[in-house]
Amino acid sequence: MFFVAAFTFGLLATGAFAIPSSAERLQKRIERRASNSNRAHRSSQPAQRQSGLTASVATSNSLLSNAEHATVYTTNWAGGALIGSPAGTFKSVTGRFVVPKVSMPANGNASETYYASAWVGIDGYACDTAILQTGVDFEVIGTTVNHYVWYEWWPELSSDFEGITVKAGDTIDLLVTASSTTTGAVVVKNLKNGNTVFQNLTSSDALCESDAEWIVEDFLISKVRVPMADFKTITFTNPIATQSNGARVGPGNATIIEMRQNGTVFTSTTVSSTSVSVKYLTS
C-alpha cells in the first residue's frame, strides 16, 4: 500500500490537525512566497482541450475503456486521466516519479526562465470546476534548476511546501485524498532524503470526484502560460486511483493526453496498467 495512505487517513479521521481557513492559507501563501514574488501568482488550470479534439465522457457507471476515446490534445496538459461516472467515483490518487534532469529547450534563451510541473490530482479534465492536486515544479534559468513542491485546490492559487528539498534523481511519492467534495489532504515524500510534508485542505469549490490524473503541465504565472522546459521523460509509477467503493485501479484505461501548442506537439505519452510516461519532444 502507498506509504502515507494510512497516515493521512488517520489524520483526517482523528482531526489531529485543524483544517486552515481560507484566510489562514492565504497568509501562509504570502509568507512562503515572500522571497519569490514571481511564483506568488502560480496557478494550474483545467485541461484546455483543443477544438475538435476532445474525448467523450462516460455515461455508464464504469470507467471508459481505451477503445472509447482517441488521444486528446490540450495546450497545457500531457499524461493520463481516468474518467468515472457518476460523480463521486474517485477518493484518492497516488503516483511516484524520479525527478528528471530538466534543462532549457533546444534553441532556448539563457536569459529566459522555463518551467514544467509534474502532479497527481482529482478532477480538472471531465470536471473543470475544481482540482485537488499536489506535485513538483521545475524552474530553469540558464543552467540553474530550482524545484518547488506545492499543493493546490484550484481555482485558488497554489501554495509551496516548506520542509522538503528535491533534486534531480530523487524519487517522489505523491498522494491526494478527498474525504468529501470540499475537504481533503495532500502528502508528498522524498524517498531519497526522507522529507515528508502534508496539508489538510478545505474549499468552497466542490470537487466532482469524477477524474483521476497523472499529469505534466505547462502552468500559469500571473495568468500567463510559462515557457516550457525540457523535462526529458517523467514516468509515474505506483499509479493507483481509489474509488468510492474501495476498488483500487491503475491507469490502464486512462485517456491519453498530449500537449500541443501553435500546431506543435511537445509530448509523447504512453499509458499502461502500471505507469503513465510523458516524454518531451524536442523541436
Image (cartoon, grey):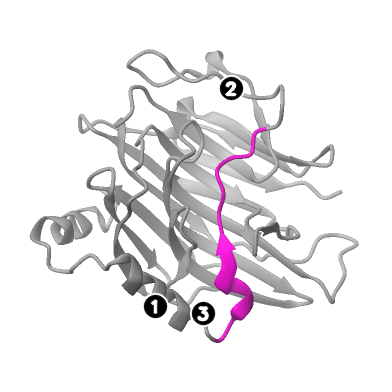
Q: Earlier in the sequence, mark 2 or mark 1?
A: 1
Question: What is the crowding at mark 2: few (fewer than 14 residues within 10 Å), some, or many (at least 20)?
Answer: some
Distance, label 1 to label 3, CA atoms, is 10 Å
Q: Amino acid at mark 2?
A: Ala
Q: Residue furthest right?
A: 107
Q: Earlier in the sequence, mark 1 or mark 3?
A: 1
Magenta-tinted stretch = 35-49
**For discs 3 and 2, the disc positioned in front in the rendered view:** 3
Image quadrant in which you'd find residue 256 = top right
Q: Position of residue 26 (x, y in %)?
A: 40, 72
Distance, label 2 to label 1, CA atoms, is 39 Å
Distance, label 3 to label 2, CA atoms, is 37 Å
What residue does disc 2 label?
55
Q: Position of residue 35 (x, y in %)?
A: 56, 86
Q: Position of residue 254 (x, y in %)?
A: 49, 29
Q: Residue at x 41, y 78 (%)?
A: 162
Question: What is the crowding at mark 1: few (fewer than 14 residues within 10 Å), some, or many (at least 20)?
Answer: few
* Of residues 129 and 79, the one drawn nearer to the viewer in this rendering: 129
What residue does disc 3 label?
33
- In magenta stretch: residue 37: yes
Q: Amino acid at mark 3?
A: Arg
What residue does disc 1 label?
27
Tell me if residue 263 can be seen: yes
In the image, is residue 251 above or below residue 106? above
Q: Amino acid at mark 1?
A: Gln
